Amino acid sequence: MGLMYSVEFEATAVATASGDVDFFEIVPGDDAPVLIHAIYLSQSSDVGDAAEEMLRVKIIRLPATVTSGTGGAAATPVPLNVRYPAASAACEVLNTAVATTSGTAVDIHSDTFNIRAGWVYLPTPEMRPRVAQAEGIVVRLMAAVTDELTMSGTLYMEEL
């Protein structure tokens, strides 16, 4: 087993004007492929029936050269064991201008979730997406939210 890390954002606004948003962008470091173990998304601002909406989300592999998204923030992966070294992957959260690739992007997983329930992606070991050096992976909101949401999220990854 490799080294386990979490990448997260907390109580951050996702505006209606944002359109597509990369909740997470992970680009593995040299010779350190990444395996995605779990992803959690939730919101804390819209709790009533009238505010309910369904959000479309995708996990997308970006093969070849990745041009990082912008408008979000760099995120430092946190080791789950205090004795682990710093992760080599470059991570960003909540990019409002989404990442692109010189290759053909590959959709790995598509889903829809109710904002009141949140989204949990917890694949079996055989179904965990793996991303190699010179590739990237994003967890993308596929359309603008109806009204601004205050969202939080955590992605658990393993560096091999």
Image (cartoon, rainbow, N blue to C red):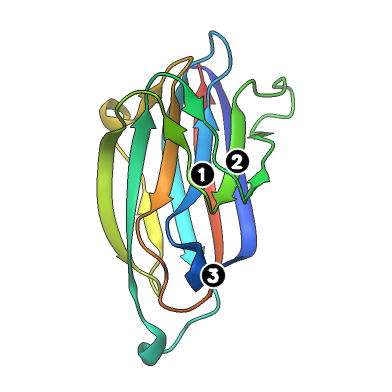
Image position, residue 109 (x, y; %): 27, 42
Front: mark 2 or 3: 3
Q: Nearer the viewer, residue 143 or 11?
A: 143
Residue at horizontal 52 percent and vertical 17 percent from the top: 2
Residue at horizontal 48 percent and vertical 64 percent from the top: 42
Front: mark 3 or 1: 3
Is 24 positioned to the left or the right of 57 in the image?
right
Are the two marked residues, 2 and 3, in contact with CB atoms closer than 8 angstroms?
Answer: no
Residue at mark 1: 24
Within 10 angstroms of label 1, few (less than 14), some, or many (20 or more) residues?
many
Q: CA distance from mark 3 to mark 1?
A: 16 Å
Image position, residue 92 (x, y; %): 60, 41
Could you say which disc has been placed on residue 15 in the image?
3
Are the two marked residues, 2 and 1, in contact with CB atoms closer than 8 angstroms?
Answer: yes
Could you say which disc has been placed on residue 134 in the image?
none
Is 156 positioned to the left or the right of 140 in the image?
right
Q: CA distance from mark 2 to mark 1?
A: 6 Å
SS label for mark 3: loop
Q: CA distance from mark 2 to mark 3?
A: 18 Å
Q: Is residue 45 above or below residue 95?
A: below
SS label for mark 1: strand
Q: Nearer the viewer, residue 87 or 57?
A: 57
Residue at mark 2: 92
Are the two marked residues, 3 and 1, in contact with CB atoms closer than 8 angstroms?
Answer: no
Residue at horizontal 44 percent and vertical 21 percent from the top: 135
* N-terminal-most mark, 3 or 1: 3
SS label for mark 2: strand
